[in-house]
Amino acid sequence: MNQSSPSSLESYPLPVRRRLRSLLTLLSLPFLAFLVLPLVALILRTSPQELLANLQKPQVIQAILLSLTTSLTSTLVIVVIGTPLALALARHVLPFERLVDTLVDLPLVLPPAVAGVALLMAFGRRGILGESITGLGIEIAFTPMAVILAQIFIAAPFYIKSARLGFEAVDHELVQAADLDGASGWQVFRFVVTPLSWAAVLSGAVMAWARALGEFGATIIFAGNFPGRTQTMPLAIYLGFELDLDIALTLSVILMGFSFLALFAVRGLLDRK
């Protein structure tokens, strides 16, 4: 016999359920209006004709291409280097796990400007590693590489947290059974863990990409705001408020569209799961 969860209204009598639904809907409207109004205003402020015209401007094209290139690169790096850490956290094999878990989550609450300064102190010319890297003829700060590193630093927790939850949800008995059948660690991960956690892993990658695409604070400090070189879409929006508001509006609509599609895709993956 099916039982309703404590949070469900189905356990209440029908008249009570109707009143509760009406009340909750009414109380939800103010905040929903607060969320929707700015987004609608942004869309109404930019006509399709202006959007198409601005998309042909070199500065807009450069910002879009740079943002897509760097965010996709950073997401790929995050998946490659973040998956082992997510799996280690899910299997609880790391020493000082609580400290590691806190460090992973720290970029989520750390002010982006602080992250930018920290990256500059680590990889800038006078940073801890900067002098050694510069001696090899490699420049990181204020280059596209700095954009990628800033995006990785800020966006990685979104992937690691989601992938960890997916790995933790895999039935441990299945993993043990594969081990008993003689499967190697890689085979267990490839043929057992990955198929059962792919939705969480892919959702985390999409969320990390969306966060990397919108990264601003750490990027402007560590990479600068140089058109065609380090000026991503968020930086171009910032500059557009001073020089060309139409460009700022166009890029804002594009970023909002990307963010909406990313969230919509994640919701779809989780619903299918």
Image (cartoon, grey):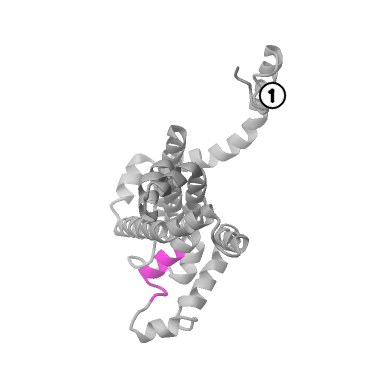
Left or right relative to 34: residue 62: left
Q: Nearer the viewer, residue 107 or 256?
A: 107
Of 32 and 24, the residue lying toward us: 24
Residue occupying the point 68% across, 27% down: 6
Q: Where 160 sits versus 43, above or below?
A: below
Residue 33, percent from left and from top: 59, 35
Characterize the magenta stretch by its predominant secondary structure: helix
Image quadrant occupied by the C terminus: top left
Q: Is 42 rendered above or below residue 18?
A: below
Q: Which of 56 and 111 is in front in this view?
A: 111
User: Label 1: which residue?
Assistant: 23
Choose top left, top right, bottom left or bottom right for residue 66: bottom left
Is residue 27 visible to us here? yes
The quarter of the picture where residue 261 lies is top left
Task: Point out residue 136 in the picture as x, y percentages from the top left corner.
Answer: 34, 84
Which residue appears at 42% of the width and 75% of the height? 141
Question: Magenta segment: does it hold 168?
Answer: no
Horizontal relation, residue 243 to residue 90: left or right: left
User: Disc count in the image?
Assistant: 1
- Image position of 53 (left or right of 157): left
**Can residue 200 be seen in this snapshot?**
no
Q: Position of residue 31 (x, y in %)?
A: 62, 37
At x 32% / y 58%, what residue is drawn? Answer: 69
- Badge 1 crowding class, 10 Å Cα cut-off, few under 14, some 14 to 19, many 20 or more, is few
Q: Quadrant of the N terminus?
A: top right
Q: Residue flagged by tag 1: what amino acid is it?
A: Leu
On screen, residue 214 above or below 51: below
Q: What secondary structure is marked by label 1?
A: helix
Instruction: Give the magenta part as a residue range.
Output: 140-150
Image coordinates of residue 67 in percent, x first then y, are 37, 57
